[in-house]
Image (spheres, rainbow, N blue to C red):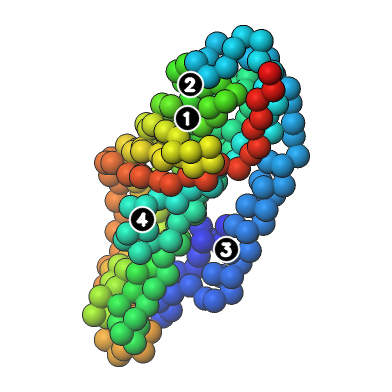
Amino acid sequence: LSVLNHKATANHRTLSNSDVKNNWLIIVAFLISLSAHAQGERTDVSAFDSRSWTPDTTVTLTLPVLAVKSNLLYDVALTPNIEVERWFGHESRYSFAAEFNFPWYTWHNHSRAYEVMEVGLEYRHWYGARTSPLTPLQGAFWGAYFSGGYYDVEWGYKGNRGHFTSWGLSLGYSTALSRHWHMEFSGALGGILFVNTRYDDPQHNDRIHRLYRKHAFYVLPTKLKVALVWMIGNRRVER
């Protein structure tokens, strides 16, 4: 992704419009490909021991289930975000998720900015008795993630910008609100490596002056999520 290969120069403060457009096209193409896959596979499975159905129940399930999410904590912070997660069927207890965070604001004649583009991937392993064909992507899980991106935060013609990468482990729980809506609670602990440039814009013309640059690495909580989840996939119980 171009966001991970942004050419940070000393005289331009933000990504170009073409860079932003290219990133959007990549994300849209990725979501379309996952959605098409999610509608194309079907399987019949025998019933399992569950409180809601009997041992002779036959379950017809559309596979894989695709979940589309938004982190409500980010939404409150005016940080647009989207995540898609694909479940790989009743015989597996794992899923794969991709997320994209994209606040991109400037105001007060470019004297203030909140610009972040982050792309992340995550593997998840689901466990517990609730991992059955009738309850995909429910219950507890642990995961491993990797993410990276670009940021530019400015206030009063002084700011910080740079690139970062992060990786670590996640832990969470998802519960059903209805057939097609879930709520997810999760957090992550990991490392974050970034190259930060401190700058100012003394001429107020978007031609910045670099004050210093530093590399840093920290281990700390990296994610906190309260997500509303839309489940895509048709499920039907046949007795």
**Residue closest to the eye, 213 or 6:** 6
What is the CA distance from the residue labelled 4 to the residue labelled 3?
A: 20 Å
Residue of label 3: 23
Looking at the image, do the residues carrying marks 3 and 1 touch, with CB atoms under 8 Å apart? no
Residue displayed at 36% across by 48% down: 193
Residue of label 1: 138
Type of the residue with mark 2: Arg
What is the CA distance from the residue labelled 3 to the residue labelled 2?
A: 37 Å
The image position of residue 142, as x and y in percent, is 42, 28
State which mark lies toward you, 4 or 1: 1
Residue of label 4: 74
What secondary structure is marked by label 1? loop
What is the CA distance from the residue labelled 4 to the residue labelled 1?
A: 22 Å
What is the CA distance from the residue labelled 1 to the residue labelled 2?
A: 7 Å
Residue of label 2: 130
Type of the residue with mark 4: Tyr
Q: Residues within 10 Å of mark 3 (few under 14, many from 20)?
A: some
Residue displayed at 58% across by 64% down: 24
Residue 229 higher or lower than 80, as above or below:
above
Residue 82 higher or lower than 219, as above or below:
below
